[in-house]
Amino acid sequence: MGKQLQKTIVDILKKTINRQLYYYLDICTRCSICKNACHQYIMTNDLIYLPAYRAELILRIYRKYLTRTGRFISALNRAREIDEQWLDDLYKVTYSCTGCRRCMYYCPFSIDTSWLLALGKAILVAADKYPPIISEISNASIFKGENMEILKEDIIEGLKEYEKELQEKVDDPSATIPVDLKGADILYVSLPGSYSVLTAASIFHQARANWTLSLYEPANFGYFLGDTEKAAVTAKRIIDEAKRLEVKEIVISECGHGYRVMKWLWDTWSKEENPFKIRCILEVMAEYIKEERIRLNRGQIQKALTYHDPCQLARNSGIYEEPRYILRQIATDFRELTPNREKNWCCGGGGGLQAEPELEDFRLKTGEKKVEQIRNSGAKIVVAPCDNCRLQLEDLNKKYNLDISVYSVMELVADATVISKPVFPISNLD
Amino acid sequence: MLWVSVPFLLAGMTFRIFLWFRVPRSEMKLGIFGQKEHRTTKWLKLGKDSFLFPQVLDIDRGMWGFLISFHLAIAVLFIGHLRLIFEFTALAKALGDLGMEQFAFLIGGAIGIILLITVFYFLIRRLTLPGKKISAPEDYFLLILLLLVIFTGNYMRFFGDIPITAYRQYVNSLLSFNPYIPTALDTSVARWSLGIHVMFANMLIFYLPFSKLMHFVGSFATNRIRREYLWVNSYKRL
C-alpha cells in the first residue's frame, strides 16, 4: 500500500472523529450480544458479518492512529495498521451490510455499527475500492441533475403516455400528471415506473390535491456508495427543484432510504437547512383517508395480509402506524409479522445489495429470517413500501416458494379507491 | 495506596470524560425511532436501557441473566463495602450484633458467589466463538483482574475471620490521613488475603479509567443517542 493512500486514510480518520465515535471507541466491550440481532450473521455464521467484528475492524484503526494506548501498546487492544488486507476485509464487511441498524437497537450500549461502516465506506471511496455498479448509478443520477434541461423534454414526453393511461383508469379525461407546476402544494418524488407514478397520480387526482411530479427520483446511490458528497448532490437536486417551483412540501414515494436521506440525513451532510416539510406518501395517504378526501372500498382484501416494516422507513425514520392504519381499512385479515416495527427483521435486500449481482446468493440466503417470519404469519399478501424490500421479497418468494403476492401500499390504495372502476385491478385479490 | 488510587481514579475518569467532550459532536441523527413520547418518559426509558438492558433480555435471555446478576451484585457489593466506613445503624439495631453479622455473611457470601460465577461466564464467553475472535488482551486482563479481586474477597469471607470493627477503624484511619492498623486486624488470619485483596482492588481502580469499565459512564451517553430522535408521530400504536 502506498504511503500517500495511508496518509489520505489517516486524514479521513482525523476528519471524521467525533464525540459519538469516541464513546464507541471507549465503551464497546465486544460482548457480541449483537450476534443474535443480525440476520446476516445468523444465516451465515460467518464472523465477518458479526456487527461487533465489523465495528472492531474500523475501531482498531481509529485506536491505532487516534489513541495513545493504540499507538504505544497496540497489542493490548489489537489496534492495527492500515494495509491491503485490512482494506480487503473492510470492503467485504461494509458493502455487504444492509444498514438496517437492528444491531444498534439491540446493543446494550447502542453502538451504531451501520454508521461506523459509513465511515468505513468513506475510506474505501478514498481508496477507489467500491462496487463499480453502485458508483455508476450514482454518477448517472448526478449526470441527470446536471443535464436536466436537455433530458426534460424526453421525460415529459414519456409522462404523456402515463397521463393517457391515468385518464382511462380514473375515467376522467381531465386527469393530468402535472410536471414543473409552479406554486403546487406538493412536489411528489416518484420512483421510476408506472406503479409509483400512476398510483400516486390517481390518488392525488381523487384527493383533488394540488401537486406536481418531480423530474427526479428519491433513490440515492451516493448514500449506498458511502460518498456523502455525491449523496448530498443527488438529494439537493430535489431541494432545488422544490425551491424553483415554490412548493409547500416534498412528498417521497415508497422508498425507504430515499425518505431517510431527505428527511434525516441531507441537512447534516450538506450543512444546509432544509426549508421544506418532508413527508412520505404513506403519511399523505393516511391523511387523505382520515380526512375522507379519498374513500376506500373497506374490506376489499379478504386474503391474509401482512406488512413488512422497511428498516429505513420504520426503525430508522419512524413510519410505523400510518401504513397499518391504511391497510386495516382495506384488509379484513391483517396479520403482524413477529417481531415487528423497530424490532422487525431486515429482509436482506437493502443497502444497495440489490444492485450487486455478486451478492445475490448471499442476499437470498440472509433473507431466510424474513422467509421464516412470513411463513409463520400465514399471510398470502405481503405489503412493503420500499422498492428494495419489494424486489427482495419477490426474489425470496421465487426461491423459497412462499406462494405470496408482494405489493406496495400505494398499489392497494389506488386499487381500493372508490371510483367508477378499479385503478389497478389486482387479479389475485379476493 | 488508597490515597493515590482514589484520586487517580477520579482524575482519570474526569480526563477520559474531558477527552470525549473535547471533540465536537456529530450532528448526524442516529436515533432509533419509536413512538411519540413525553420528555420524562424518554429519560425514564434511557434509565431502563442503561440499568435493565431490556434489549438484551429480548434476544439473549441467558446473557441477560448473567449481566443483570453481575451488575446488581456490583451495586450491592458497593453498598456492602460502605460498612467499612460506617455501620448501617438502623439495620444493626433491628437485627442485633449477631444478626447483623449473619446477615452480612449471607448477603456478602451470596454476592461473592454470584460475582464469581458471572465473571467466569464472561470469561468463558470470550474464550468461545465468536467472542474469541474479536476479544483483545485488555478484555482478558480486565476479567482476570476482576476474578482475582473477587476470589480474594471470597477467600476472606469464607475462610478468614472478618473483624468488622477493626476494618472500620483501619479504613477510617486512612480516610482521616492518620493511618494505623488495629491489633485485631494485625493478628487476624485474613490479614494476608486482605492485603492481596486490597492490592488487586487498587490495581482495578488504577486501571478503570483506561479500561472498558468506562462503559458505566459512557453507556448513558450512547443510549441517549439511541433515544435521541424519538419522532413525534401523530399515530398511536395500533
Image (tube, rainbow, N blue to C red):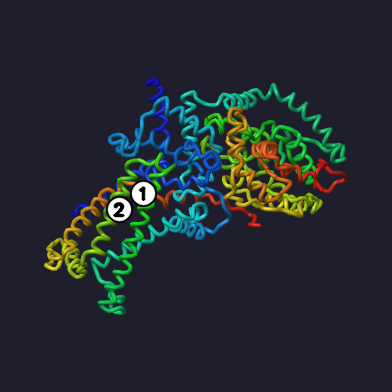
Residue A429 appearing in the image: yes
Give the mark count: 2
Q: At which x and y percent is residue A146? A: 62, 24
B169 relative position to A24: left or right: left
Q: Is residue A309 above or below residue B174?
A: above
Label 2 marks a residue whose chain is: B
Give the CA separation, mark 2 to mark 1: 10 Å
Front residue (pair B222, B104):
B104
Q: Residues within 10 Å of mark 2 (few under 14, many from 20)?
A: many
Q: At which x and y percent is residue B164? A: 21, 69
Query: Could you tell me if the residues under marks 2 and 1 are in contact, i.e. CB atoms within 8 Å?
Result: yes
Q: Residue at x 26, y 60 (%)?
A: B153
Q: At which x and y percent is residue A171? A: 87, 40
Residue A246 appearing in the image: no
Residue A218 image-quadrant placement: top right
Front residue (pair A201, A315):
A315
Amino acid type, callout 1:
Leu
Mark 2 or mark 1: whose residue is earlier in sequence: 1
Q: Residues within 10 Å of mark 1 (few under 14, many from 20)?
A: some
A10 relative position to A72: left or right: right
Which residue position holds label 1? B123
Please give the label number shown on residue B147. 2
Q: At which x and y percent is residue A370? A: 62, 44
Q: Residue at x 12, y 65 (%)?
A: B187
